[in-house]
Image (cartoon, grey):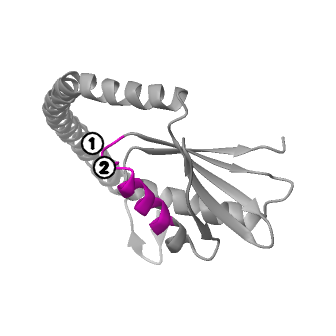
Amino acid sequence: MKNKGIAIELTALLDVILIMLFWVMLNMEDQTEKAKTDAAEAIAAQQAEFDRKSDELRTELDMVKAQYERFLDENAEDTAVANQKALDEFAEGRMITLNLSYDAVGKLYILDENGEITHTMLDSEGNIAANIKKVLREQGLGKDDVILCALVYDGSRALYRDVNLVTSAAQSVGKDYSKFYCTYINISR
C-alpha cells in the first residue's frame, strides 16, 4: 500500500505483532501455572499447620477433660452428701424463709423452722443482704454450705419494686455464699 510515497508492509508488521501476542500468552500461561502451584503448596502448608495445631489442641482438651473428670470423681461424693443433707433438712422444714409482708409498711421477715429470727425494712438491697448474711452466720452456716431459701410473697399485695429489691438482695447473698439457692413463691396464684 502506498501513501504519499511511503510504502508500509503490513504483513510483516502483523507477523511481528502476532508473534509477540503468542509469546505474551505463553508467558502468562506459565505464570498462571506457577501461581497455581505456589498457591497449592501454600494451602497444603497451611492445612498441615492447622492439622498440627488442631491435634495439639485436641490433646490439651483431652487432658483438661480428664482432669475435670478426676476432680468430679474426687469431689462428687462430698457434693452429693452436702446436697442430700440440705434436701433432707428442707424436707424437715429446716430452711431459711424470707417472708415479704405488709402491715402499715412493707417488711421482710427472715424465719427458720422455729419461727422469726429477725425482720428488716425494705429500704435498700445492701441492708437486706446484710441482714440475710447476718442470719446465715448466726445459724452457723458457712460460705461453702448448701443453703436452701424461699422468698414467699403475696403477688396481689406485694409491690413489684419490693419483690425485685429482695430478689436482688438474695442474688447478692449468692455471690458470697456460692451454694445459696433461693426459690420465689407467689402465694396469690
Q: Mark 2 points at which residue?
A: 142
Let me know if residue 98 appears in the view: yes
- Front position in the image: 64 or 88: 88
User: Magenta span has 134?
Assistant: yes
**In-front residue for pair 161/188:** 188
Kindly state the secondary structure of the residue where label 1 is placed: helix
Residue at left offset 69%, top offset 58%: 100
Residue positioned most to the right = 156
In front: label 2 or label 1: 2
The image shows residue 156, relative to residue 108, as above or below, that is above
Residue at left 39%, top 68%?
Answer: 7
Relative to residue 27, is residue 131 drawn left or right? right
Dividing the image into 4 quarters, which one contains the C terminus?
top right
x and y, in percent, of residue 119 in the image? 59, 64
Residue 91 relative to residue 133: left or right: right
Residue 173 versus residue 131: which sits nearer the camera? 131
| Placement of 157 over or under 150, stated as above or below | below
What crowding class fits label 1: few (fewer than 14 Cα within 10 Å), some (14-19), or many (20 or more)?
few
Category of crowding for the residue at label 2, using alpha-carbon neighbours closer than 10 angstroms: few (below 14), some (14–19), many (at least 20) = some
Q: Where is residue 164 in the image (x, y as percent from the top left)?
A: 66, 62
Residue 107 on the magenta span: no
The kind of residue tagged 2 is: Gly
Q: Which residue lies furthest to the front in this view?
A: 114
Magenta range: 129-145
Q: Can residue 10 be seen in this view?
A: no
Give the percent coordinates (x, y) of residue 162: 70, 66
**65 left or right, relative to 163:** left
SS at mark 2 in the image: loop
Question: Pointer 1: what residue?
Answer: 32
